[in-house]
Amino acid sequence: MVKEERRRAAHVLLLDAGNAFSDSRSARGKVIVEAMNLLNYDAMALGDRDFSLGLEDLRQRIAEAEFPILSANAMLTATGELFAKPYAIKGIGEHKAAIIGLTNPKAALMAGGGSITVLDPFETARRYLAELGEEADIVIVLSNLGLKEDKRLASEVEGIDLIVGGNSRTVLNPPLRIGPTGTIIVQAGYHGEWVGKVELSIDEKGKVTSYKGKTVLLGPDFADDPEMRTLLNASK
């Protein structure tokens, strides 16, 4: 499906809202990183369950990733430094998109030992939106907060064009648009069973003028990708 979308459209971003590494069958996330590298992901947010790997293994997965893994609000308690990059800037034609990662506050419990402090995601979003105003004309938030909090974020924080959500494992079909901010929310279940697709029409000023989206069930109509099958067979 990803290959077909890239053949069809000139500007495609492949994004993930987190908890991709928490499956214990995936060699502590290593196979997942390899698969996401093969898929040529553009960005991923850190989810709360990703921190169940432990900080050292999670650092290793971030180092292995050929794409940015983001969290603007997960902080090392001992130093006050962010655990990961807060955002990435991606070119989309003549536009620049800021992609901000927000981690669920439960990550502090998953990491254990008080090693991680998770800053308030709403205040964090406001702060980075103010900082990124000169760098990007489109703002995408990869949110691991869950749908209830995504709706609140979309309602209370202006300037977000799109929220790619996770954690609550919701299949949104079609996407939501929240007034009066106009923020669009998408979410596509979990375990890779569904892929969410949203198409945005953007004017020269970076304003979203229209959108359409759906979730696609990756059922038997989709044949195994040969490259991915080779990778998975080698990992057994």
Image (spheres, helix red, strand yellow):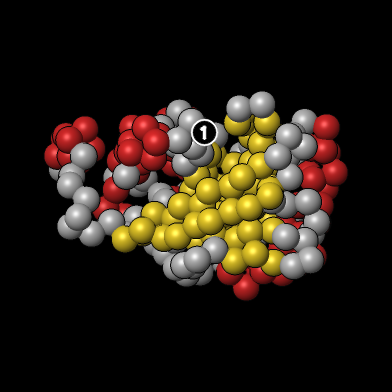
Mark 1 nearby-residue class (10 Å; few <14, some 14–19, many ≥20): few
Residue under label 1, please give it: 11
Q: Which residue is at a point 52% across and 33% down the rendered structure image?
A: 11
Farthest-out residue, bottom: 148
In the image, is residue 230 above or below residue 199?
above
Q: Which secondary structure lies at badge 1?
A: loop
Q: Is residue 151 left or right of residue 32?
A: right
Q: Which residue is at a point 83% across and 32% down the rendered structure image?
A: 134
In the image, is residue 167 above or below residue 41?
below
Q: Quadrant of residue 148?
A: bottom right
Depth order, front residue of 149/111: 149
Q: Quadrant of residue 33?
A: top left
Q: Is residue 107 left or right of residue 224?
A: right
Residue 144 position within the rendered picture, expressed as x and y whole percent measured from the top left: 57, 58
Dot 1 amino acid type: His
Residue 216 position within the rendered picture, expressed as x and y whole percent measured from the top left: 36, 58
Residue 227 shows up from this direction: yes
